[in-house]
Image (tube, rainbow, N blue to C red):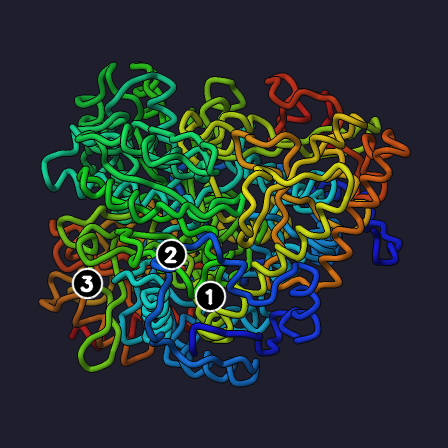
Amino acid sequence: MIKSKIRKYHAPVWDEPLVMDLSVKGRRGSLAPITEAEISKSVGDASGLLNSALKRVNPPLLPEISEFEAQRHYLHLSQQTLGMMGISLFGTCTMKYNPRVNERIVGQHFVTEMHPYQSPETMQGIFEIIYRFDTMLRELSGLDKFIFQAGGGADAAYIQATITRAYHADRGELAQRNEIITTAQAHPCNPATAAAAGFKIITLPLEADGYPSLEALKAALSNRTAALMVNNPDDIGIYNPNIRQWVDLVHAAGGLCFYDHANFNGVMTRIRAADLGFDACMYMLHKTFGGQKGGGGPAVGAYGCNEKLIKYLPGPRVEKAEDGSFYLESEGKQSVGRVREFLGNVPVVIRAYSWTRAMGIEGLRDAANISVLANNYMEKRLLAIPGVTKGLSELTQRRLEMTRYSLGELTAETGVSCIDIQNRMTDFGVDAYWLSHEPWFIPEPFTPEAGELWSIEDIDYWIDVLETVCNEARSNPELVKTSPHNQVVHRQGGTNLNDPSKWATTYRAYKRKYGVENK
Amino acid sequence: MNNKSPIPNPHPFMANSALISYQEMMKVAEVSDIEELFEQIPQDHRFVGKWKFEDQIASEASLHKHLTEILSKNKSGQDFTNYLGAGCWQHYVPAICDEMVQRTEFSTPVWGTPSSDHGRNQVWFEFCSQLGELVSMDFVGLPLYSYGAAAGHAIRMAARINGRKRVLIAGSVDPERLKVIKTYCGYSELDGYIEIEMVAIDEKTGGIDLADLKAKIKDDVTAFYCESPNYFGILESSAKSIAEITSGVGAEFIIGVDPITLGVVIAPGDFGADIVVGTTQSLGVHMNAGGGVGGFIATRDEERYAREYPTLQVSLTETIVPGEMAFGLTLFEQSSYGSREHGKDWTGNSVYLWTVANATYMSLLGPSGFKDIGEAILQRSHYAAKKIGEIPGVKVKWSGGFFKEFIVDFNATKKSVAQINKALLAKKIFGGKDLSEEFTQYGQSALYCVTEIHTQVDIDALVEALKEVTR
């Protein structure tokens, strides 16, 4: 039953041209500092400083616009991006408030104008925050060291794959131990990074309990096993209660155990990776720990491990000296080297430290409780909507911070798909829900995650919009199938963008393929 | 904190921490004790100890003070004059670039639909399009974690394209990036391993030793990778010859560039490079203690390359309404999101927000701005090199052919770079990157970086300081 008054909404429409098409010859948006006369006198013109074979003859076809025109253009584009301006319950990504105080802090020169190779005595503030946050994550996980070099969760999974290589190479067993085990419900980055690192992938399928059986795991284990990479709970909200036995079995077979803690929000302060026996884990600072998402980074996959793996970590690491000062420890011979340049996305680490201090351990507990409670609150209301069913509904235990639902019944009845519904919801200022990672186990899936941010009124409104759209699917399916109608633009047309004669990732390619003349 | 927290404390980040909201949810969810909701987690999985955690600072005013106190212990490139570069460069960042990356609409979302994300997708397309103009390539992917990650992925692309397992890499590439590349090239015990062989530096110019390249390149080589400017700041003047050599054996020519050079320096697409990689940090992103890095991959618009990209790509197209501009993903199925371990390497969160700064930066500068900034940097860096080279006992190793970085050779001063940099620090100067451990053959040498931010006054002060500390 719809509780809220459905409000009027229309996305801002500026019909904003491409910046390249705003160009007027001779306009300037930025001027370089004037070279001092004495410098010019001393070294001559710049053209004399470049080998003639290296000179650019054809100037790049960049826009020529004034400073204000550039500003207004990108402001328009920001307004034409819905995201968190409305309600976004994008499951698996844990949409949170990104405190503005952090933007004020990381926008100052003591963060922005810092160079990674400065001498340590000039970087004590940065090092202190990195170290103190490392210490906090150690407490939350029970592990022994965290690093922040990985540029996202997938990059942290890649660190695990590289450490798995180094660990087994160190024992002379790498040629034999070339298999990494994961599950069908693990995020694609786990098998993908492991394969990119050279491992063969064994994917355990889901079984009746909502996770793979112990027997399936046992059958997959052998002296070829290099590691297990797994999440828990998964993003259906199901927790594998056998995970301790899993870890013990993998260890007994000689493999390492990596805990992809992307879904940490619901289990914060209850579960610690090390207590379950894991050798390493990963937290998403841009999800669980309040860092901003940026539409896809800069992000940080904080990678933590136990004592036995520290020597393999990529370098350098921030450590604390006996006198209380902080320094960089270079990687040793057994280290994997680098997965990415420098210390990682330092501003994201500062935001995460700040957020975690603002929460405190009691706030983390409250956030976990509220996010799981909000998900269960949502479930009661969502399942009251005709056409919405719960994924793996035979599993009746309470789900954690996410539940995957299906619109399959509604689709069968109306022909309206979960993607149609997703598009139509944006007409109410509600941004896309998450569907499901590949492969889909549940027909017409959707996966909302309320988290601790969204108010009960926001959650209600989201559900009310969904119900409104489900009603429309029955009364006027065409309206939903041709949606959105109140968005910046309509739905993408029928062009096959996998056709090489049609795709255009740059304007120069587009102009060539579609016969547009240069201005 | 005890582990039972029956009701939450009201917190500014959590609307439902208000008791009335919390209790309403409990009622509707039919929960009497919050622990009922965690019934899936066996008791013996749960943490029961006492937490050792730093105290909560829930007040923004207190938190602001706390963070400011810690970070004020830093000395920045604004407090001091900075001559460090080496993969992370201090350029001026226009205020509008900062404004745009701080816009809540851009900084907080994740994914919407193509219609609700239209503004952001347009930024992405404008990022790829403008970068494509600078490098003179028609196909550009969305950004990668870093320059080094882009180089690593590009080498793996080459190996998938031609099936060869050996890569030649110039000895003049950035050592930090080389570490990343080595990681990407894998281990000989496992699948997908790519063997690395280094090509010598021409000690007369600082560029590639072409004779060594010719001697080592054979038809089992998947690609040759070099950088221009290279780690020593030198622009590769034999790029056209390299392109002929690589194509002669069917190898890919992968080149790393810094796009800020490309208003004055020939575009890699115009001298026969096959795959172009590089940094995005120099295009309107602050150094951020190394947290400003980002990378890109660009190629000709040929299926041979396009079908091996590990990134996501956004394409310009139309909506269902003819003539209405839309953006859609192309070749999504080959990504790890689409195909898990069967995809092309992997992708995930990257540095997408920096594309907002990059696109804004490129549109502000335009063709004339890139030419001006390139010329300003060339003149300032060469002025600095000339003046430093006049100091007794101090030499500039390669006094021509560089863009913004150059090697200063302090061997004749009998002082170590560490000593010199320590003395410079007392004069509020961050001296150049110490090369004495990375390139032992150059002894006590340092890599200096001079950009448009350095005035003649700054440079003259550096020269005076160096005179004093090397005396």
- Mark 1 vs mark 3: give the one in front: 1
Q: Tell whether label 1 touches label 2 (CB within 8 Å).
A: yes
Q: Tell whether label 3 touches label 2 (CB within 8 Å).
A: no
Q: In screen coordinates, is A73 left or right of B168?
A: right
What chain does badge 2 belong to?
A
The residue wearing badge 2 is A302
Viewer-nearest residue: B405 or A430: A430
Q: Position of residue A268 (x, y in %)?
A: 45, 62
Q: Quadrant of the C terminus of chain A?
A: top right
Q: Position of residue B344 (x, y in %)?
A: 43, 28
Q: What's the residue at 47%, 59% (across, down)?
A: B91
Q: What's the residue at 63%, 48% (across, down)?
A: A448
Q: Secondary structure at mark 2?
A: strand
Residue B399 shows up from this direction: yes
What chain does badge 1 belong to?
A
What chain does badge 3 belong to?
B
The residue wearing badge 3 is B394
The residue wearing badge 1 is A352
Number of other residues with Cα within 10 Å of mark 3, as a class: few under 14, some 14 to 19, many 20 or more: some
| Dot label at residue A59 | none
| Badge 1 amino acid | Ala
| Badge 3 amino acid | Val
Per the model, the C-alpha gap separating discs 2 and 1 is 10 Å
Q: Tell whether label 3 touches label 1 (CB within 8 Å).
A: no
Residue B362 shows up from this direction: no
| Badge 2 amino acid | Ala
